[in-house]
Image (cartoon, coloured by chain):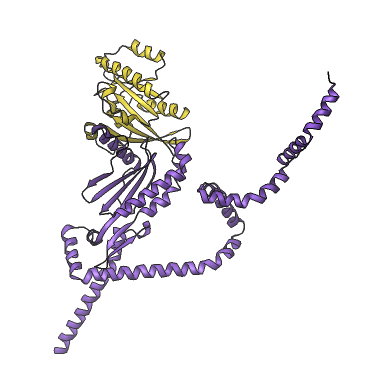
Chain colours: A purple, B yellow
Amino acid sequence: MHSPDELNSLRTLILAPEQLEIGELKERLDDPEIRAEELSRIIAEAIVIRASRDRKLATALLPTIEEIIRDSVKRDPKFLADSIFPIIGPAIRRSIAESLRAMLESMSSTLEHTFSWRGIKWRIESFRTGKPFAEIVLMHTLVYRMEQLFLIHKETGLVLQHAAAESVDLKDADMVSAMLTAIQDFVNDSFSAKEDSSLQNLNLGELTIWIEQSPRTILASVIRGNPPQELKTALKESLENVEFEYNSALNSFNGDAAPFEQVKPDLMYCLSQAQKTDGKGTRVTSMPATIAKPKKVGKKDNPILFIYIAAALCIAIIVVGYIFSTW
Amino acid sequence: MIQKKICMLGSFAVGKTSLVSRFVDNMFSDKYLTTIGVKIDKKVITLQQQDLTLVIWDIAGENGFHQIHGTYLRGMSGYILVADKTRASTLDTVVSIKKTVGQAFHDTPCVLLMNKMDLAGQWDVQESTIDKLSEEGWDVFRTSAKTGQNVEEAFNRLAIKMLEK
């Protein structure tokens, strides 16, 4: 038999170095100052690694950063104004230059459409059909236009995100998404398609609906005209990115589409269109801001009217002048 | 906003579409029911200070579950069974549907709507039968698509059950 003292001595003899290490580790874990000191050594590298992997860090920090900026502006607006002052000038100059370029391009296009034989034909067509001139121009020059995108949760048919070009006649995205899913189920059931096969295209007059699928999501794109195949590849890639970046949100989806808000800018970027440019090829534009808006284009018709009126006045002055001079 | 998919199930002509029409704003016409066998409607309700979008799949009524497109039920958060108080056979169908659906969708909330309560003179289902179902744990609502009796209450009850789940 050994006495407790002997056992303690033996334990100390055998485990002393480990006990010392455990003690040190415990102290490091319990002391916030030491933990902060240690974290400060790796936090920058950790942020870089995480930011390169996915967008969760940005998503997590966004509300805090917005709050900080709001508080800063509230407390001292001058500080932020001074900070962004160096970039305001170039930003304004760039914006003005861009607006002027767009205006010149639009005027050039308008003049071309107005005075060319083709333009006159389109005017007559517009008059005959009662459609706005801008719509007739768009109809004749449009190669394709991505009008709507629906990101749908595959299992439930619920819409995760929806983006639409301006001036598109919008229906309820929730119901359209569900109906698209139902149609897909109906086709699969009715024709006993294999599990991995799916409806990929729907055609209706000028409209094409492409349906891209990933394991948990569907991306349905509504396109007017004849879209190029490269666009399909781009959409597939977008869908793959969603699957990758929103993996956990998709796994835990319970009907709340809030985690997918961040997808919207990406979808908006996909809303591209291409127009013919008078034998000079095709001009592809993306971003919704560049998408034709018939009503606003209609407003751009005002300069044409002005030109007509000015031309009529000039002719009238010349005629009146000629008549007076012959008297 | 949280969205939930719910399905309406029951025999032909029990009043499913009329009940839905009473409750929601429609976008698609009823012809979808006879073509692809389903019509989608939507209703936004506010429960516990929280907006909830119900995407309602009104599935065409047949005389048994085997004739329903099973895939339409995939991903649903709850379902509404509808029987016609003037046709006892429709209640039998509903019981059969509940049994089959219950096997595939464990613990998915559901409510039973005993419809056409306004046709008092033509009732075929005994009140005692309905009471018995209630005692067995069924959430039963006596409804009328014509008068709107208990329609909102039934949908709200299902919504609460889905949120509580």
Residue placed furthest toward the top? B128
Which of the image's four quarters has the C terminus of chain A? bottom left
Q: Quick one: A26 or B30, which is closer to the camera?
A: A26
- Residue drawn 64% across and 50% down? A42
Q: Position of residue B6 (x, y in %)?
A: 36, 30
Would residue B118 be found to the left or right of residue A18 on screen?
left
Camera-side residue of A251 and A261? A251
Kindly identify the residue that appears in the image at 67 percent across and 51 percent down.
A41
Q: Looking at the image, which residue is at 19% across and 65% down?
A: A123
- Residue A83: quarter of image: bottom right
Residue A67 in view, yes or no: no
Dividing the picture into quadrants, the one containing residue B65 is top left
Q: Which residue is the extreme one toward the left?
A: A327
In the rendered image, which quarter is residue B162 located in? Answer: top left
- Residue A294: where, in percent of width, then height? 29, 58
Q: Is residue A120 visible?
A: yes
The answer to whether B121 appears left or right of A325 in the picture is right
Give the image location of residue A288, x and y in percent. Answer: 37, 56
Q: Is residue B25 above or below residue A271?
A: above
**Residue B54, position as x, y percentages in the image:** 38, 34
